[in-house]
Amino acid sequence: MGRYAVKRLIQGVITVWFIATATFFAMHAVPGDPLSGDKALTEKIRANLEAKYGLDQPLMTQYAIYLGNIAQGDFGISFTQENREVNDIIREHFPVSATLGILAIVFAGLGGVLWGALTAIYRNRLPDTIIMFLVILGISVPSFVIAALGQLSLVNINEWTGVSILPVGGWGTVWHMIVPSMVLGLGTMAYLTRLMRSSMLEIINSDFVRTAKSKGVPPTQIFTRHQLRNAILPVITVLGPSIATITTGGFVVEIIFAIPGLGRYFVQAVQQLDYTVIMGTTVFYGAFLVFMVILVDLIYGLIDPRVRLE
């Protein structure tokens, strides 16, 4: 296990380096000057920024400075937000995105396992048909459409009842988190439902389940100890990347519901061509995703003793 963990960590570092490199050269291939317009108010400010990031140096020199800063955990200073470091933006706004993402993944994980198990138990019957129809909708409809419909439904419900049952937007209380987290986790829940259904159907028809039934094991025990425990393994495999994707990928949901998360600042940075914020958040997202994948690989071996990590 120890050798495997070290090997995966080395692979993770190489992956993060590749993400950082690809992001750097992709940003420098984009037309435009990051210090143009009102981003650098004086020639002195422009000269200081050029000296700090080597913008007046050859591309490979800039690349070396960029990697050196990342290695020290320094993502630089925003070109558009005065006296604000990218590290501060991540530190202040990632917890908001993480909170929203955790609630969304809990909703998606519990719902995916529950609905997937129900569709397998009631295969080709009415509950299976209804749930799978909703699953297809959840996978097919884009998140921005679901977010807009969710917000519109909230407005109509609040107008119909005459009271504000749930806030339409903003952040700060538990009530602000409910609808955005459900909207954010809906697509993942639909995907996990399909995955859980397929896995559950394979387990239901397996030899050890038939053996347990022939021995007179109670159905509840068969479901919890044999069917559910084994069928959930593929779900856990994709749960790590799903956690990272949801936690860092709620860009549209954060914008529509006016949530001050990190995704909202990433979108603003793209619109304003803020190189340091774009590159810093992209590398941070990539590192977080790699970490979650490695963590799930290690947990997978602990959950299923048959798996040997080598």
Image (cartoon, rainbow, N blue to C red):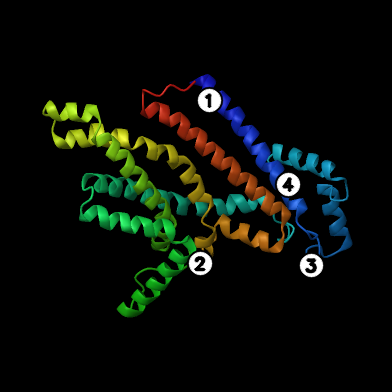
The disc at residue 256 is: 2
Distance from the alpha carbon under mark 2 to that under mark 4: 29 Å
Distance from the alpha carbon under mark 3 to that under mark 1: 48 Å
The residue carrying mark 4 is: 24
Mark nearest the camera among 2 and 3 is 2
Distance from the alpha carbon under mark 1 to that under mark 4: 28 Å
Relative side of 257 to 193, left or right: right
Distance from the alpha carbon under mark 2 to that under mark 1: 40 Å
Mark nearest the camera among 3 and 1 is 1
Query: For numbered disc 4, what is the local secondary structure?
Result: helix
Where 260 sits versus 241, above or below? Answer: below
Q: Earlier in the sequence, mark 3 or mark 1?
A: 1
The residue carrying mark 1 is: 5
| Quarter holding residue 176 | bottom left
The disc at residue 38 is: 3
Query: For numbered disc 2, what is the local secondary structure?
Result: helix
Query: For numbered disc 3, what is the local secondary structure?
Result: loop
Discs 2, 3 touching: Cβ within 8 Å: no
Relative side of 244 to 36, left or right: left
Mark nearest the camera among 4 and 3 is 4
Identity of the residue drawn at 59% across and 49% down: 91
Q: Earlier in the sequence, mark 2 or mark 3?
A: 3
Mark 2 burial class by Cα count in 10 Å: few <14, some 14-19, many 20+: some
Q: Nearer the viewer, residue 41 or 137?
A: 137
Image location of residue 21, percent across then percent down: 71, 42
Discs 2, 1 touching: Cβ within 8 Å: no
Badge 3 amino acid: Asp
Badge 4 amino acid: Phe
Query: For numbered disc 1, what is the local secondary structure?
Result: helix
